Amino acid sequence: MAGIQLGASPQPRLGQLIKRHLHDWLILVVLGVIIWILNAVEPFHRYLSKEMLTPEIKYPFKEDTVPMFVVPVYAVLLPCIIFLMYYISRRDVYDVHYAIMGILYSVLITAVITDAIKDAVGRPRPNFFYRCFPDGKAVFQTDGDVMCTNLSEKVIKEGYKSFPSGHTSWSFAGLGFLGLYLCGKIKVFNGEGYAAKLCIVVLPYLAAALVGISRVDDYWHHWTDVFTGALIGSTISATCYLQFFPFPHLPNGWAPYAFFTRIEDNRCSKEAVDSKVANAVVDVEGGGKSYL
């Protein structure tokens, strides 16, 4: 079906598509609630004796280069703006609906997985020591575990949530989805050999990688946290993209499955009508009863 034009299939209104997938949109709300609960839960506090306070968790505690509130802006809002720009250009309701739904599922599923692992593992961040002891003087309980002197419970709580990196997983979930979306839209793998298109597709992944590197540079994460976050985000983004869109290298990789399914349904309906009309004409010509 390569080369099919958008006008070949009448499209429903956006509201109709949303209504049809209302349960899918409600699940997104449920995922958001789960994320809120996971963030409210106290993570596992790993036992840390004096001997376990190694240099790898004694890095300075400073502000992060990329604040958490910025992540949804570039990982979700920016891609959605690009989806809307494509919609304004092509008026493809299927595309904008499934692209926005897909990236939301990608980011929210990734967030649930990441936060659940964070709470279960309770790995100390590289800056844990100065989160726990702002004055640099370690204090321990009777069992030998650390007794944090920082008055901010939030700072201490976040100190046990190093693995995996949420910034990195969110970034690869959102920007990775965008990279696959652009790959399909500009037909990077159409066999014409325009390697320059690859640069456009690589940009979202590069941006996500730089965010991950900043987490190591700021001493908020170990490199293994960032690497794992990138794997989680990349895997979920690819899975969610392929739920709604074909592989980008395929001839029909530029549009969602639903678009071509609707075309096929219309074609089958037209063939059925044409067949019925032909049979009716034969009946009339043969002196039989007409059902026209």
Image (cartoon, rainbow, N blue to C red):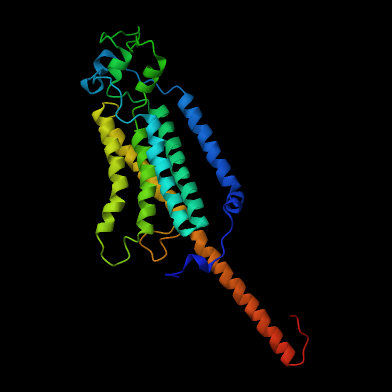
Q: Looking at the figure, which quarter contains the N terminus?
A: bottom left
Left or right, residue 172 beside residue 263: left
Left or right, residue 199 beside residue 187: left
Left or right, residue 219 beside residue 99: left
Is 94 situated above or below 291? above
The residue at the point 63 percent across, 76 percent down is 272
**Quadrant hosting residue 281:** bottom right
Closer to the camera, 17 or 90? 90
The residue at the point 42 percent across, 23 percent down is 43
> Total number of numbered labels?
0
The residue at the point 30 percent across, 8 percent down is 139
Residue ranking furthest to the left: 55
Is 225 situated above or below 146? below
Closer to the camera, 84 or 112? 84
Image coordinates for residue 64, horizontal then vertical, percent = 30, 26
Left or right, residue 50 beside residue 79: left
Q: Looking at the figure, which quarter contains the C terminus?
A: bottom right
Image coordinates for residue 132, horizontal then vertical, percent = 32, 14
Image coordinates for residue 240, horizontal then vertical, percent = 44, 49
The residue at the point 28 percent across, 34 percent down is 224
Residue ranking furthest to the front: 88
Closer to the camera, 226 or 284? 284
**Quadrant hosting residue 242:** bottom left
Is 16 situated above or below 118? below
Residue ranking furthest to the bottom: 286
Is 50 situated above or below 290? above
Image coordinates for residue 195, horizontal then vertical, percent = 24, 60
